[in-house]
Image: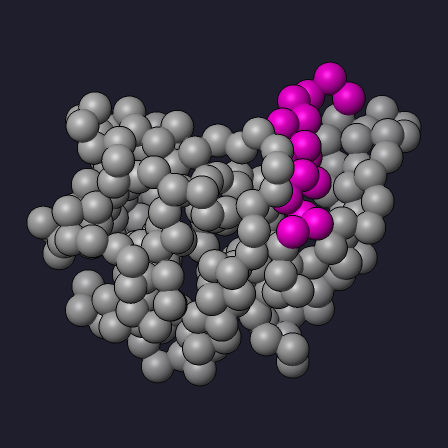
Amino acid sequence: MFVKGQPDGGPLDEFDREESVNRVLPRCAPRVLWRLQAGGWHLMGFEGIDGERAAYEPDSPELDLVVAALTAVGHCVAPRTRLMTIWDRWGYYCEPGDRAYLSGLHLLHTDPAPQNFLIDGQGAHLVDWAWPALGPAWVDAALWGVRLMSDGGQGPEQAHRWVSRVPAWRSAGPEALRVFTRAEAASWSDAAREAPEVANIAQAARDWADYWS
């Protein structure tokens, strides 16, 4: 079992979002077992995964498992609950006329970092659904491209070959990719000014955006 905790008095938005989408997620995501308040804490228990974080290097055999997990997520139906949209998250970095490129009703994870894919004998498990959003089906694959570069040392062409294996990627148009990757790069650049430890991700995001420009 894995348990998340939040002290009383803190925001519960992430708990609420994660619980609201859990019932519609594919089996590659661990199930919420319970949620309770006790001893000054809000707690949420999940199925435990005895696995290790995914390796994103170009020759990693785990990349195929990550593709399978992203493919499964691409087939799930979004719950009938209020969720933020991709435009809510990234629209600040776009022009008003770009909104149509980032519109969609697909449920997305939005954080395909290697620590969020736990690998065990059953495959890749996508955990930490605290920031789900609605948007175009290809967005998680586009975000994965940045992390293949920042965490796996891959070049843009290598990352492109891997994200192309996710079926939802086929629906991504060139202009939509240009708009979104530029917005993601600007977002990471802002984050790096406050947190220098993410500078390598910011650089990867800029390189990924340049590749699609």
Horizontal side of 125 relative to 68 (left or right) equals right
The magenta stretch spans residue 13:
yes
Horizontal side of 153 relative to 132 (left or right) equals left
Residue visible at 49% across and 72% down in the picture: 68
Horizontal side of 151 relative to 205 (left or right) equals right
Kindly tell me whether residue 55 is visible in this rendering: no
Q: Nearer the viewer, residue 25 or 45?
A: 25
Give residue 54's position: percent from left, percent from top: 50, 68
Give residue 70's position: percent from left, percent from top: 47, 63
**Rendered image quadrant of residue 76:** bottom right
- The structure's colour scheme is one colour
The magenta stretch spans residue 176:
no
> Looking at the image, which residue sits at the far top?
9
**On-image quarter of the N terminus:** bottom right
Give residue 83's position: percent from left, percent from top: 53, 32
Residue visible at 57% across and 29% down in the picture: 82
Kindly tell me whether residue 75 is visible in this rendering: yes
In this picture, which residue range is highlighted in magenta? Answer: 8-24
**Rendered image quadrant of residue 8:** top right
Residue visible at 56% across and 51% down in the picture: 77
Residue visible at 73% across and 55% down in the picture: 31
**Rendered image quadrant of residue 148:** bottom left
Give residue 50's position: percent from left, percent from top: 70, 68
Relative to residue 23, is residue 85 depicted above or below? above
Q: Nearer the viewer, residue 125 or 165?
A: 165
Relative to residue 48, is residue 62 depicted above or below? below
Horizontal side of 7 relative to 190 (left or right) equals right
Q: Nearer the viewer, residue 155 or 193?
A: 155
